[in-house]
Amino acid sequence: MRALPRGTDLPVLLPVAPRRAAPGGQAGRLRARHGAWLALALLAALAVGEAQAGPGEDSIVAAILRWTPLLGQGFALNVAMSFIAMTVGTAAGTLLGLCQISLMPPVRGSSRFVTQFFRNAPWLVLLFYCMLLLPFELRIGGVVIPLPGWVKATFGLSLPVMANMSEIVRGAVQSIPFGQWESAESLAFTRRQTLWMIILPQCVKRMLPPWMNLYAILVVGTPLCSIVGVNEAMTLTNDALAAEARRELLVPMYLYLLLWFFLYCYPIALWTGRLERRFAVDA
């Protein structure tokens, strides 16, 4: 065998390159500097607006503070809709995801079709369908249950959440090594016992970070409901601008609302990054 030159290392003996992870998570995740830039943009818009304000008019800051309680009510509706849609979508998506790994081909095929259909359907189209096709009230016996617009819009938002949650559950279950299924089978566990007692408890830490990312996406998607007439924060912001009838208030008001969404979603992004680092699963 021909000897290698001195100083030459065998490739198979080289140490494995350490995995490099960007500090703070993924490159596209919210960071504190994004909030600082947004705050600076808001201050600049306020300064420009004050310069454009006519004599005798209220200051831009005073106008924004006057409408803040109303905007807070609208933002509270955004948060409530996101909570309800996430709860409904998580419950339905978990069941749908488990159906995707069913051993029965009809169940597996139909659940995959439903998942892909709602996962790739535009959110706004689903909102329009729910707002126009669902009734304004339900009659159960002699009881009339009203269905306001925000309830129908919340149901429309829960459909894509259900589909994405289905994929999260399916991916988490299939990421568990198959040897655990075989080990459970050798111990006389049924498939249901294996799934609920062994597989799903391990899937929780794998599903939690993407589930939180999905919730953050849902929160920033709730302003779509303003297009279908729901009185959430974006709709009330437009109403405030129409009532003020001041064009110099346009950019500051929207930046102000955007800052609210950032302050709500930024802690979610921080917590998601910590969970991803804590629950990192090596391939």
Image (cartoon, rainbow, N blue to C red):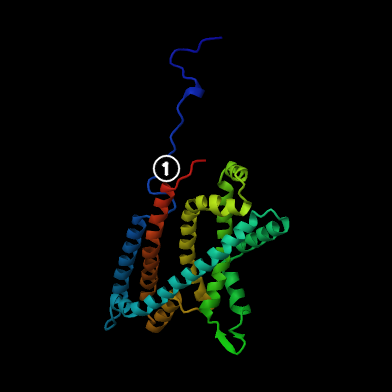
Whether 139 is drawn above or below 281: the answer is below
Q: Quadrant of residue 93?
A: bottom right
**Element type where label 1 sits in the image:** loop
Instruction: Give the side of residue 37 with respect to residue 161, left or right.
Output: left
| Identity, as a three-letter code, of the amino acid under mark 1 | Ala
- Residue 261 lies, in percent from the top left, at 40, 66
Q: Is residue 110 at all visible to an observer of this figure?
A: yes
Q: Residue at x 45, y 76 (%)?
A: 232
Q: Quadrant of residue 72?
A: bottom left
Q: Residues within 10 Å of mark 1 (few under 14, many from 20)?
A: few
Q: What residue appears at the point 37 percent right and 68 percent down from the top-left corner?
A: 260
- Quadrant (top left, top right, bottom left, bottom right) of the N terminus: top right
Could you tell me residue 270's position as x and y percent? 38, 55
Residue at 32% in and 63% down: 39
Residue reaching furthest front?
Answer: 188
Look at the picture and state if 156 lies above or below 267. below
Residue with the mark numbered 1: 21
| Tag count | 1
